[in-house]
Image (cartoon, rainbow, N blue to C red):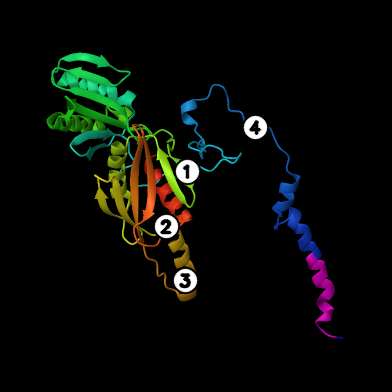
Amino acid sequence: MNSALKWMPLVAVIALATAGCARDGFYHDRNLDYGEAEESAPLVLPDGRDAERYRDAMPVPEVSGTRPAEDGVVEAPLPQALSPGRSMDRGYVERRAVGDERWLVVGAEPATVWPELERFVRSRGLTVTASDSHRGILETDQARLSVRPALRSGDSEIRCEQGGTTQAACLTALERHFEGVSASSSAASLAAQRPDAQNPARFEQRGDDWQVILPFAADRLWAELSHQLELDFAVEGRRELLERDPAARSFLVGYLTQSERERGLLQSLATLNLGESTRQVRLVLEARGPEETVLKAQGAGEEALSTEDQRELLERVAGLLR
């Protein structure tokens, strides 16, 4: 008799024994537990507990910024672009400019900025001739100060003008004031968490072309995009800001399009060489009304930009305004 066969009964017994251990022994099969699990009552903490000591370990944020439903389908919200040069702390103070016009952008809501604007006027000994908190306007004996929501949600624009002309010295003083407020430990409200941003972009397709409708004046939008593109389009070989033309309200960018990225991936799998190259694309702003502007993406060369590449690039650029 083959010696190997003599051990077969013993192997069978051991197999049966270990199978039994899979349920109650060393090798517990948890799949059975999931199948037999029953829902229990939720855990209730004592009423007298200190609420400040208990927080969600892994909170799930509320969904916001979804696009309107089209044909019963709701699209997921666009991701917020992280600009490499932008501090994510609230309370920053930055300048914007278009032509001879200058203003500040502060990382706080107008309701938070307004009391600081009043404090600035008092600290300078200016005489207030008119004040309208609802419109965000402070008239003084030397200049007109104003605050209103900026293009990016949660930000504010501050201006200091006289007869429609920017007062450079006043704007510099305001900039220093709000920089001091931002750095002060007593100004915690300026460093508050950024509210959920609603993307104001409305996408429209006309034939093979996409365009974005934005509810902002063309000059304000150009100034803001100029700043945001300078921060975000600063990755060599991927996305770069090449030229700015304020007169034509346009930007020339070098961009690694979606189709080029996909082509490069397939080529790299076959040849171990990415072979990716950026396309030159012109982003153009066209005023449609006092507070409405159309944004388009056009190939700068002879080859037209595909429909998919237009949409993907415009989504990224529009996401910079959230």
Please report the residue visible at 44 percent of the width from the left and 55 percent of the height from the top: 309
Give the CA distance from mark 4 to mark 2.
55 Å
Magenta segment includes 311? no
Given residues 43 and 88, the one toward you in this image is 88
Q: Quadrant of the C terminus?
A: top left
Q: Which residue type carries mark 1?
A: Glu
Nearer-N-terminus badge (2/1): 1
The answer to whether any part of residue 211 appears in the image is yes
Name the main secondary structure of what is drawn in magenta: helix
Precedes in sequence: disc 4 or disc 1: 4
Q: Is 3 a magenta residue?
A: yes
Q: Say which amino acid is labelled 4.
A: Pro
Depth check: give the residue in front, 141 or 15.
141
Boundaries of the magenta span: 2-15
Write down the residue under mark 3: 267
**Residue beneath label 2, please?**
305
The secondary structure type at the circle numbered 4 is: loop
Q: Position of residue 28 (x, y in %)?
A: 71, 55
Real-space Cα distance between discs 3 and 4? 53 Å
